[in-house]
Image: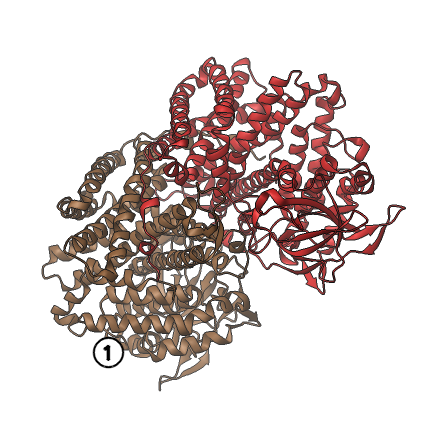
Chain colours: A red, B brown
Amino acid sequence: MAQVIADRKDIDFVLHEQFKVGDLAQHDRFAEFPKKVVDMVITEARNLAVKEILPTFKIGDEVGCKFEKGVVTTPEEFHRAWALLREGEWMALTRDPKWGGQGMPETIAIAARDYFIGANMALLLCVSLTHGAARLVELFGTAEQKETYLKNMYTGKWGGTMLLTEPEAGSDLGALTTVARKNPDGTYSITGNKIFITSGEHDLTENIIHPVLARIEGAPEGSRGISLFLVPKFHVNPDGSPGERNDVFCTGIEEKMGIHGSPTCSMALGEKGNCIGTLLGEENKGLAEMFVMMNEERLLVASQSLSSISSAYLYALDYARKRVQSAQAGVKGGAPVAIINHPDVRLMLLTMKMYLEGFRSLIYYIANCEDQKHVAEDAAQKERFQNLIDVLIPVAKGYGSDRAVEMCSMGLQVFGGYGYTCDYPMEQLLRDVRICPIYEGTNGIQALDLIGRKLGMKNGQLFTDMLAEIKKTLQFAKGVDAVGGLANRFEELVDGFALLSQQIAQDAKTPEALKRIANASPFLHVTGDVVMGWMVLWRAAIAAEALAKGAKKKDVAFYEGQLQSARFFVESILPVTQGRMAAVSDPGSAVLDISDDAFGGK
Amino acid sequence: MAQVIADRKDIDFVLHEQFKVGDLAQHDRFAEFPKKVVDMVITEARNLAVKEILPTFKIGDEVGCKFEKGVVTTPEEFHRAWALLREGEWMALTRDPKWGGQGMPETIAIAARDYFIGANMALLLCVSLTHGAARLVELFGTAEQKETYLKNMYTGKWGGTMLLTEPEAGSDLGALTTVARKNPDGTYSITGNKIFITSGEHDLTENIIHPVLARIEGAPEGSRGISLFLVPKFHVNPDGSPGERNDVFCTGIEEKMGIHGSPTCSMALGEKGNCIGTLLGEENKGLAEMFVMMNEERLLVASQSLSSISSAYLYALDYARKRVQSAQAGVKGGAPVAIINHPDVRLMLLTMKMYLEGFRSLIYYIANCEDQKHVAEDAAQKERFQNLIDVLIPVAKGYGSDRAVEMCSMGLQVFGGYGYTCDYPMEQLLRDVRICPIYEGTNGIQALDLIGRKLGMKNGQLFTDMLAEIKKTLQFAKGVDAVGGLANRFEELVDGFALLSQQIAQDAKTPEALKRIANASPFLHVTGDVVMGWMVLWRAAIAAEALAKGAKKKDVAFYEGQLQSARFFVESILPVTQGRMAAVSDPGSAVLDISDDAFGGK
């Protein structure tokens, strides 16, 4: 039977052959997760995702969330799925068991999430946001705050959100106007309005805990005067049960293109003058604290992008195998064949496959760096892994979500007219995934983060560390017969990219800097292509080695598929990347020179 | 006030400065359309589109079409818009006044349609399909068929469709199974089922005339045995009024991603054994006859793509001018500015602008070739214009609609989170335009048409003619100071493209041909890029000349904007195109070599 959501063979390959996740069990911290347990976890996650969560995918879209008088109702079927995720303790896999977690490596958790998110991205948003909010409590909360909230959040009994955005403060959080006034008892009275709040209100949990960005009266203007507060929907009684309703209400939900199963709420705080919260962390450090969570949230968006590509690919592949239409190219009057035999369809499928594989490896790699950081023994090693994470996050989020929109659209195209109808999941996948380039920092902001912050950070050390890892893969691949030629061609690209990054970094303090900034997005895409090449070459080298050693018959086709993906990258993508590099390397200034009036439209 | 749908200045520039459409009035055929009349027509079209049709855009999406017991109801507001289009005689602008047309040049009509389609693509589909069906009657009908149907169709009193697709015969029309049995009176009884029939049933007109592809009993298999029939919804009484209901019924409409205002119908013919039609044209020539309309239908899809980019650009531009957020790049602590000042937003806007301008010129150019063909005096000239049309149609449809999806998505991105909500038109534009790469021949088929048919046709004459036109523009541009440098860089690209096309054409009968076919889509995209470059360079050369001669103050910014678009193409797109050419020039065979099993997913 055709696989859905994610190809188990591919996940196993990445976990075990590429990242050897079972080896983490050699360290005390992860001793409970040898290979056997990993496989069990993935099998269970997959079963739950395919059998119980995937059936809610279309329901979430069609039924959606309803808003009436401050109350948001989610589809009935979501409640059962939520309960199963809670019962299976799937909501905080990597967290400390003391707070309801499983203490699992991130690399395993990300594979489980690959299935869950792919089964219903909209529903899983609420799980992930709850996790992120709880992380803030764990990292910055007082002992009392942790006791009050943490376990209930990590176990999905209570939900969590992030109240950042305001109508006039979207990407520019420093401009926000929500105010907090300190009360004599040390709590704060908060007044303001927030928009685009995912899961700001819903009926899946008995309480919802809102981390809120606000400015304490008299605090400095801009980002230096923002603090973080915890505002529960229901105040918590001394016995830990939800008590009195707090003055934080949903005033409406957005009608939007997709993720209809996820309520995007407008929130009013303190309309009755009675919204009470407690300070989370330090005064005026709210933005920095919130940003600690940014890597997690951006990796989440990257995971959504990955899962969307994965689903789109598997659906398109299955359709292409079953749909019979037209004779083989060059066979005049031949019998109609399955469309997977048509070169143009194969081109679409192999394009999707290549990006899917490269992107899955990238996302799991980032998760693996988290684990390696934890088990690394010296500080320099830890820093190196953090550097890799920091440089790869904007690539995974920005480049990944742009590719995800393209690949879901390509998957839809494989279905022809049927793909445009609601009879197949393709159009929903495309509508849902279109949010990914926008939220948690638009892709424009990811590009600026990469070129304006990460590139120059620590004197270029982040890029140096990434390039060193790429070189390791190149060395490995050059030693494997079947991929040596591909590695040589990829090396040219990498060398060019290294030069380009240096060149751009050097321009940072010169008058050329603005031209570089105007080319931030093309540079992000070049970086992403290089990273894709790195990942697919790495995979191909492993596969070629396995084939050379004499792989099991049932694995041969998969391994050969890895070689074809890498060949496809080198043959069809790499020359285009070189063209992109040429454009970024010698950027023009039309974008900066054109006057406002010359854009026309008036 | 900000312009919507299309920038009038840009339309005027293309009509008058680039294609000098007023000069057509020197020919008898178009004597009634001097510049002054052209301007009046465009002004009226624009007023009607902006004031009366655009307000139905969102209604069409939200209310959509309803199906109940064989009856399809369109939104109430569509009826008024339809009536106004009829009253203004906008439905058959270029047709013979004898049949209710206006005898207008295509170049003017396409500009009027630019506004109408941009105002409501879903509604205009019904207008265009009616026109296309009527054209079949005009070209292949008997005198009686013409008398009975033609004027009513061209004036929008009756609707028209195209009944081609069947569940198992989508792109492969030769496989269709609808059967026609000849009756003693010379009519045919037709039995079969059709799907994806745009406007197959609706309540905008008192009758609907269906051209139907079917196989006469005993006819050869495949495409050589297909005939075309005319099947009216209501038989026509001797006095010309609609009479008895024919046995052709809508059995349902598709739920789909967009164009909700356009009913996509499943049609059952002869379920009661009583669907009666008349032969249109010759027996067994149906497919060839239907294909006569293909250029018109594909140009329509290209127009839809153009209008979508145009609307998306103007909305995004207006938003970017009004939305204030974050300080200027490099100005630390500066006041927030309109986002049009941010380099990344400018990059998106200029990208959209460049494709919009290049694409508008291309579409109008194709329309202009139609007019030039009509007024050309010798057969060789006529053939040359037809060659240009034939080679550019798959580029306009395939490349254009792919870019349109991208550009609408980019326009949405300019709005950030707001773009994803239904409060702004961006997400609908994207959902609507996503059909364009699919219908009237998927873009994969357009690519095959270009590389497999048009490239080799007449010994390469079509490409030769196109390249000769590009060279003319190059010669002109090289003589204009301000764009000479750009022209030189573009010439390199064109020379490379000419070589590449030759190389591919030579491979057509060799074992390399399959590799070429597998790269049909990348080749289409390379061709499209070259054509975009051609058009924007042409525009820039005209603008530079105008500036050099001393343009009016009110026109200076527009002309400068043309130079910036061409610079942007050369600086930022051209190097990427060169990369694409490199990949297409030396194509690998991973796409062909990968085995079915190696795609995975099982």
Q: Which residue: 86% across, 46% down?
A: A240
> Which of the 4 image quadrants contains residue A488?
top left
Q: Position of residue A120 (x, y in %)?
A: 65, 46
Q: Say whether residue A325 is visible.
A: yes
Q: Which residue: 17% across, 62% down?
A: B20
In the picture, measured across the screen, residue B178 lies left or right of residue A122, that is left
Q: Position of residue A375 (x, y in %)?
A: 68, 20
Q: Position of residue A420 (x, y in %)?
A: 50, 54
Q: Measured along the vertical axis of the image, is residue B36 above or below residue B360?
A: below
> Which of the 4 image quadrants contains residue B592?
top left
Q: Measured along the vertical axis of the image, is residue A362 above or below residue A476?
A: below
- In depth, the one of A271 and A32 nearer the eye is A271
Q: Say whether residue A338 is visible.
A: no
Report the quarter where the C terminus of chain A lies.
Answer: bottom left
Residue that badge 1 annotates: B98
- In depth, the one of A324 and A394 nearer the eye is A394
Q: Measured along the vertical axis of the image, is residue B298 above or below residue A111?
A: below
Q: Residue furthest right?
A: A239
Q: Secondary structure at mark 1?
A: helix
Chain letter, disc 1 residue: B
Q: Position of residue A408 (x, y in %)?
A: 51, 45
* Amino acid type assigned to the residue bearing label 1 in the image: Lys
